[in-house]
Image (tube, helix red, strand yellow):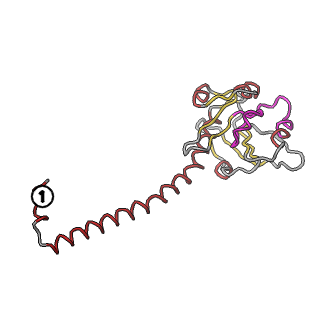
Amino acid sequence: MLRSFMPFLYAPRCLRKIGWYALGVLLWLWACGAAAQAPQTAVAAQVAAPASVKQTVWGILGYARWPGHPPTIQLCLVGETPYGAVLQLDEFLPDGRQVLARRVALEGHASLEGCHALYAGRLRAGQWQRLMASRPPGQPLLTLSEDPAYCQQGGMFCLDMSRPQVGFELSLDSLARSGVRVNPRVLGLSRYKEAN
């Protein structure tokens, strides 16, 4: 290494100055390139979040079983759901069941009739409780939420959006009362939340 550097040391002084300037320019270009890539990485993480939410929700729905084994799963969305757009795409689960999404209006009398799963975004105070009270008696209903507080108020799956790869908490008490069976493999992926 020292021998390859030696000719540079014995080069005329003007060439050594040019060499140091060239090294400075290269370092500056490298730093500008690294800084330009940082925003692209942040944009990629923002783009990946909706896909991660969809993958998590579809994974939970795929491992859930309702009485009567309906061929079509009705996913109802309520509240402000920043990720609702990716969930409103009617698609098929890996086992062939179709997921049809629809919005449920919270004004007036909200009806959960025909809903197999409920995806809740941000709601105003008391709306979650009124929504759960409007659920037809004995209706099997799987609930998912973007708000972790709903797991303490009768919700089942509360998504954790704080990481790029979406995780979730699970209320075992609410799941046991839901009338929906969920494969134990999903239960192993969650963090359990004790009911209050």
Q: Where residue 168 sits: x, y (%)?
A: 62, 36
Q: Where residue 123 sits: x, y (%)?
A: 78, 47
- Point 16% across, 72% down: residue: 15
Residue annotated with mark 1: 4
Q: Front-most of 6 and 99?
A: 6
Q: Front-most of 154 and 117?
A: 154
Can residue 72 be seen here? The reply is no
The magenta span reads 131-156
Q: Where residue 127 sits: x, y (%)?
A: 83, 43
Can residue 47 be seen here? The reply is yes
**Magenta-colored stretch includes residue 140:** yes
Q: Front-most of 59 and 165?
A: 165
Query: What is the quadrant of residue 65 in the picture?
Result: top right
Q: Where residue 18 sits: x, y (%)?
A: 21, 72
Q: How many numbered marks, from 0 up?
A: 1
Q: Is residue 113 above or below residue 191?
A: below
Q: Is residue 114 above or below residue 196?
A: below
In the displayed structure image, the side of residue 110 where residue 22 appears, left or right: left
- Mark 1 element type: helix
- Point 58% across, 27% down: residue: 188
In the displayed structure image, the side of residue 70 where residue 106 appears, left or right: right
- Point 72% across, 30% down: residue: 66
**Magenta-colored stretch includes residue 17:** no
- In the rendered image, the residue lying farthest to the right is 108
**Amino acid under label 1?**
Ser
In the displayed structure image, the side of residue 66 where residue 1 appears, left or right: left
Viewport quadrant of the C terminus: top right
- In the rendered image, the residue lying farthest to the front is 13
- Point 58% across, 38% down: residue: 94
Label 1 packing within 10 angstroms: few (<14), some (14-19), many (20+):
few
- In the rendered image, the residue lying farthest to the bottom is 14
